[in-house]
Each structure stands twice: as structure tokens, then as C-alpha cells.
Image (cartoon, rainbow, N blue to C red):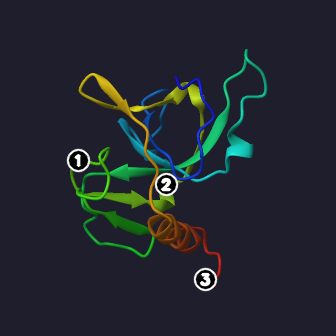
């Protein structure tokens, strides 16, 4: 579980295996935090915070959709192979599901670029049926 307040755009690990029901997202996987830091704060030390995230998948979509965003493996240290943001699987998760991305014996603290965040926002709008700007 993370003990800090994540920022919008942070790359974290999320354990989706805690009480999932198909076809919900499963497994431990990287996610991008979409909600702002003000939303992500813990209400108290006794209660974990929450975040809105979009999961990343290393499985290339069979039929790419406008709600999928490709992220190459050479852009971020915490992304070691090509992945896709699966924006139709946006999720509201507890900090108890989240952790930092490990790299050997250290943890990475990384955020995506403004351009990648904009691409994910556009894909999320498509997934939710919101008009593009």
C-alpha cells in the first residue's frame, strides 16, 4: 500500500486481484493515475485514500479501439515492454491496492508526459461517450 498522495499522471502498480468479478480487470499491473492530487488525499491516517486510474496491458488489443493508447517501451523506466492504456477499464481504487513500481531493489517514481496524458484523456472521453473537444 502506498503511504503518499499520488499525483495525476503517476505510474503505479495496482493489485486488481483483490475481489474481482469477470470481466473486470485482473492481475497486478501498472496503472496511470488520472485523478488530481486533491482527490487522491487520505481522509485520515486510519483510512486509505482513493484514486481514479486507467490500467495498462502488455497484451496488444486484437482490434485497437479509440479508447486504447499505445505506450512504447522506451519512453518510461517503469514501462519495460510496449503497453496499452485500456481506457474503457477506468477504475476507482483504494490506496490499499496501489504500490510503487519496483526495479531491482529500488522503487521508481515516474509520471507520464503531458502529451501521453492528453492522449489518455481523449481515449477516456471516447470510452465514456463524451464529445471530443
Question: What's the residue at 59%, 30% (across, down)?
Answer: 95
Q: Which element type, helix, strand or loop, lies under badge 1? A: loop
Looking at this view, name the residue that lies furthest to the right: 43
Of the image marks 1 and 3, the number of the one nearer the N terminus: 1
Q: Estimate the x, y position of residue 72 in percent, counting from the top left.
A: 26, 62
Q: Foreground: 72 or 47?
A: 72
**Residue furthest out toward the bottom:** 133
Q: Which residue is mark 3?
A: 132
Between disc 1 and disc 3, the foreground one is 1
Q: CA distance from mark 3 to mark 2?
A: 19 Å
The residue located at (24%, 54%) in the rendering is 59
How crowded pointer 3 is (Cα within 10 Å; few <14, some 14-19, many 20+) is rated as few
* As drawn, 97 above or below 63: above
User: Callout 2: 10 Å neighbours few (<14), some, many (20+)?
Assistant: some
14 lies left or right of 34: left
Say which element carries label 2. Answer: helix
Q: Secondary structure at mark 3?
A: loop
Report how far apart the C-alphas of labels 1 and 3 lie in the structure: 31 Å
93 in relation to 65, above or below: above
Q: Is residue 104 above or below residue 128?
A: above
Name the residue that disc number 2 marks: 89
Number of on-image labels: 3
* Front label number (2 vs 1): 1
The residue carrying mark 1 is 80
From the viewer's perspective, is 41 left or right of 61? Answer: right
Query: What residue is drawn where x is 23% and y is 26%?
Result: 104
Residue 44 in percent (x, y) is at 78, 21
Q: Quadrant of the C terminus?
A: bottom right
Q: Camera-side residue: 95 or 86? A: 95
Q: Quadrant of residue 78?
A: top left
x and y, in percent, of residue 34 in the image: 58, 53
> Which badge, 2 or 1, is on the more N-terminal residue?
1
Amino acid at each position: 500500500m502506498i503511504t503518499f498522495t499520488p499525483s495525476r499522471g503517476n505510474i503505479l502498480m495496482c493489485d486488481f486481484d483483490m475481489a474481482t468479478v469477470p470481466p473486470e480487470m485482473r492481475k497486478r499491473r501498472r496503472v496511470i493515475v488520472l485523478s488530481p492530487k486533491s482527490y487522491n488525499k487520505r481522509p485520515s491516517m486510519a483510512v486509505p485514500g482513493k484514486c481514479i486510474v486507467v490500467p495498462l496491458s502488455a497484451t496488444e488489443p486484437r482490434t485497437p479501439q479509440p479508447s486504447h493508447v499505445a505506450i512504447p517501451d522506451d519512453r518510461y523506466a517503469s514501462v519495460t515492454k510496449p503497453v496499452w492504456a485500456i481506457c474503457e477499464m477506468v477504475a476507482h481504487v483504494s490506496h490499499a491496492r496501489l504500490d510503487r513500481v519496483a526495479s531491482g531493489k529500488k522503487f521508481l517514481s515516474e509520471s507520464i508526459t503531458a502529451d501521453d496524458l492528453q492522449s489518455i484523456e481523449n481515449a477516456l472521453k471516447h470510452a465514456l461517450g463524451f464529445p471530443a473537444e
